[in-house]
Structure formats: C-alpha cells, structure tokens
Image (cartoon, helix red, strand yellow):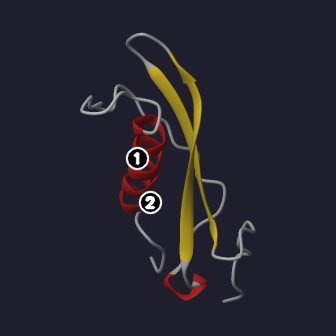
Amino acid sequence: MGCVHGGILTTLLGSVMTAAVQTALPLGKGCMTLQISVNFLKPVFVRTGEVMAEGTLVSVGRQVATAEGRIMGIDGSVFPIPKL
C-alpha cells in the first residue's frame, strides 16, 4: 500500500510515552503499558522522509501514569502528505 504500517508507528509512540513516564518514576522502578489508543491523522509514506516522535507526561498517580505522544517531521511540523 506504500505507507508505513500503523503497528510500527504505534510501537514508536509506545516507546516515547514510556520514556516520558519513566522520567517521573523513582530510580529502579519500572512500568508497563496498561492501555494504548492511537488515532492516525495522516499516513506516513516511505517517501515522507525522516520522522520523530515526542512523548509527554500528562499525569502520575500512585499506580497509573498517563502520557501522550505524537509523530512529526524532523523539523517539528506535522508532515504534509506527499504528492503521488
């Protein structure tokens, strides 16, 4: 289909969101994903070029933390859909 599989993009988002949560945990304490929900707003094509992901910590509770993530172009912009 010419685009990057959503599972790959979800894995990338899971990694950056976990890293964001880790920044708020005590040294030596780990975490695991409880739930993940992804909305794909634009496709990522092979010809899109390099992308980066950013994870942001939203809240930290006693047992559950929440983070959000986004994938963007390397310049920080939401990448345009390339012309076919």
Q: Amino acid at mark 2?
A: Leu
Looking at the image, which residue sits at the far top?
62
Where residue 14 is drawn, which disc sits there? 1
Above-or-below relation of 17 to 11: above
Left or right: residue 1 compared with residue 76: left
- Of badges 2 and 1, the one in the foreground is 1
Q: Visible in this render: residue 76?
A: yes
Residue 21: image quadrant is: top left
Q: Visible in this render: residue 44?
A: no
Could you classify mark 2 by the number of other residues whose Cα lies within 10 Å: few (under 14), some (14-19), or many (20 or more)? some
Cβ atoms under marks 2 and 1 closer than 8 Å: no
x then y, percent, for residue 32? 28, 32
Where residue 3 is drawn, which disc sits there? none
x then y, percent, for residue 53? 54, 60
Residue 59: image quadrant is: top right
Q: Disc 2 versus disc 1: distance between alpha carbons?
A: 9 Å
x then y, percent, for residue 72? 64, 65
Which residue was labeled with disc 2? 9
Seen from the viewer's position, the closer of residues 57 and 38 is 57
Q: Amino acid at mark 1?
A: Gly
Q: Secondary structure at mark 1?
A: helix
Residue 7: image quadrant is: bottom left
Quadrant showing the C terminus: bottom right
* Residue appearing at x 49%, y 36% in the figure: 37
Looking at the image, which residue sits at the far front?
27
Left or right: residue 79 compared with residue 8: right
Quadrant showing the N terminus: bottom left
x then y, percent, for residue 64? 42, 17
Above-or-below relation of 46 to 80: below
